[in-house]
Image (cartoon, grey):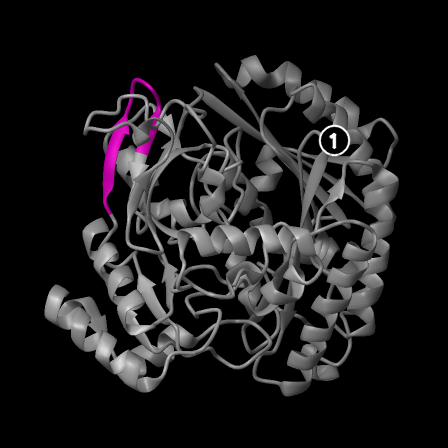
């Protein structure tokens, strides 16, 4: 952790070169940037910097090397449940790229891509495409709408639609390395200023370096190309519900062939009851139990009946020229999911009347939404931590993991919330651990629950896809030491003084 003297000298140097608007030491600002939703105290930064250009980021990095200060870059700081805006360690200088670097630099209607600075949010990109009358659509996350498109891709976040693999849809980045040098990846690495293929040619001459800057601390990405999908004339979301917890195995087996054949172009979600219901209501038993016990089966059943849902809800969408054009595909998938007698089709008209399903409707039609974040009101105190351990698309494996993970949550008096984001071979499991952050006992139980679930998955060879800042070192220790040594070697080569986010994703 940098000393207060080094921070003071750093702030003075930044102010002299970049101006007073570029950095602050104001106490209430530092307090706000230290806030998060995880089961641990806030992580207060040493200062907060606001660069307005790649050149300004270079200056911040070079001065950090000179003064021995650690930086923690963020984009819009909307990584709720994963650390929000707070640094991985106290005293690091938060570099808020989103405040002043928030321009959409290019939208190419012909080739279907855009070029973004870190502060461009899902909402801003959506609204700009709408205002332009663009033929292109974006892939939003389920929330928050003010989250950074660039940062979500770099943290391997996922969205909805056929372009849901956000990092996979990125192409060409500009990066400030830990020594202050700037590099462009892919075709952007050519000398000169003209790079017509920079954001359309994914793999160029030499090593593919883009991946080095996802979930790492090897550099600060200041711009990125993102591919956009031509908007289909018609998008038809679909929904099915299954009544029992143990139906997950059947659900996974039904989804896999639809994705391996690409019959359904979107990712398909298999989401449990409380994951959906928590966005529409609060825990009806919390006041009575004081949060010491998980919601009863009777309480769950009453909420499912109230909202017309089952233990699992399946959602996805079809694309076509018109509603009539996709009707045969909808009919086929209805037969597919209802053949065993367990699944029930929820028509789109019915889904429009079920508030928790609006999240999937909006996401699959390319509209950013904040609705999913309403789950933070399920328990008082606004605590949430996301655990993103997935499973192979094998029903028996997914079913056994959910039974074991559910038992862990119950043992800690917390509700089990899971959304499986299903592809052809892998389902990313998004586990939401909700707790009262103002209650020390619930914080301790939430922390223990996260660690026990993560250990369960890791002991069975299943790793997480993303991780909250609080648990990044914990997960790094689960990796083979040779992998950690390779990361450390890359870190030393690209950031020899370790000024960019030491400790992020367990990389020193």
State the residue at coordinates (70%, 67%). Answer: 450
Q: Secondary structure at mark 1?
A: helix
- Can residue 77 be seen in the rendering of this structure? yes
Percent across and percent down for residue 158 are 54, 43
Q: Vertical placement of 203 versus 400: above or below?
A: above
In magenta, the rendered stretch is 103-114
Give whichever of 281, 51 is nearer the camera: 51
Decide: few, some or many residues near mark 1? Use Cα within 10 Å; few <14, some 14-19, many ≥20. many
- Can residue 285 be seen in the rendering of this structure? no
Percent across and percent down for residue 467 are 59, 59
Give whichever of 33, 374 is nearer the camera: 33
The residue identified by callout 1 is: 255
**Residue 171 occupies which quadrant of the picture?**
top left
Left/right placement of residue 120 relative to residue 238 reads: left
Left/right placement of residue 270 relative to residue 367 reads: right
**Residue 129 occupies which quadrant of the picture?**
top left
Left/right placement of residue 288 relative to residue 64 reads: right
């Amino acid at each position: 952790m940098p000393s207060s003297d080094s921070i003071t000298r750093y702030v003075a140097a930044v102010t002299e070169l970049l101006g007073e608007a570029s950095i602050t030491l104001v106490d209430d600002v530092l307090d706000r940037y230290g806030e998060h939703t995880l089961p641990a105290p806030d992580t207060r930064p040493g200062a907060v910097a606001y660069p307005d250009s790649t050149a300004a980021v270079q200056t911040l990095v070079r001065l950090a090397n000179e003064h021995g200060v650690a930086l923690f870059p963020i984009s819009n700081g909307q990584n709720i449940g994963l650390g929000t805006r707070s640094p991985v360690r106290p005293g690091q200088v938060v570099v808020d790229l989103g405040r002043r670097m928030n321009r959409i630099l290019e939208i190419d209607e012909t080739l279907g891509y855009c070029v973004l600075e870190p502060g461009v949010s899902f909402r801003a990109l959506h609204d700009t495409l709408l205002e332009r009358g663009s033929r292109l659509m974006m892939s939003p996350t389920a929330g928050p709408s003010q989250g950074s498109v660039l940062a979500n891709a770099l943290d391997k976040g996922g969205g909805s639609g056929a372009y849901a693999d956000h990092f996979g849809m990125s192409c060409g980045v500009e990066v400030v390395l830990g020594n202050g040098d700037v590099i462009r990846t892919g075709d952007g690495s050519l000398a000169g200023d003209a790079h017509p293929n920079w954001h359309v040619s994914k793999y160029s001459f030499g090593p593919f370096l883009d991946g080095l800057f996802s979930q790492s601390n090897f550099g600060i990405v200041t711009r990125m190309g993102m591919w956009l999908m031509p908007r289909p004339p018609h998008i038809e979301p679909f929904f099915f519900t299954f009544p029992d917890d143990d139906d997950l195995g059947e659900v996974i087996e039904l989804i896999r062939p639809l994705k391996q054949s690409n019959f359904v172009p979107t990712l398909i979600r298999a989401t449990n009851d409380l994951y959906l219901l928590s966005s529409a209501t609060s825990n009806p038993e919390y006041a009575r139990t004081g949060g010491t016990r998980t919601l009863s089966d009777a309480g769950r059943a009453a909420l499912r009946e109230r909202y017309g849902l089952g233990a699992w809800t399946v959602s996805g969408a079809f694309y076509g020229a018109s509603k009539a054009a996709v009707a045969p595909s909808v009919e086929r998938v209805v037969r597919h999911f209802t053949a065993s007698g367990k699944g029930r089709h929820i028509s789109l008209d019915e889904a429009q009347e079920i508030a928790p399903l609006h999240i999937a409707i909006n996401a699959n039609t390319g509209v950013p939404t904040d609705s999913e974040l309403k789950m933070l009101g399920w328990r008082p105190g606004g605590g949430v931590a996301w655990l993103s351990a997935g499973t192979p698309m094998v029903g028996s494996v997914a079913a056994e993991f959910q039974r074991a993970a559910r038992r862990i949550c119950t043992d800690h008096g917390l509700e089990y919330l899971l959304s499986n984001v299903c592809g052809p071979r892998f389902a990313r499991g998004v586990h939401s651990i909700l707790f009262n952050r103002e209650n020390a006992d619930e914080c301790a139980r939430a922390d223990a629950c996260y660690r026990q679930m993560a250990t369960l998955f890791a002991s069975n060879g299943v790793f997480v896809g993303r991780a909250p800042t609080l648990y990044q070192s914990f997960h790094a220790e689960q990796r083979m030491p040779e992998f950690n040594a390779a990361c450390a070697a890359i870190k030393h080569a690209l950031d020899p003084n370790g000024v960019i986010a030491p400790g992020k994703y367990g990389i020193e």
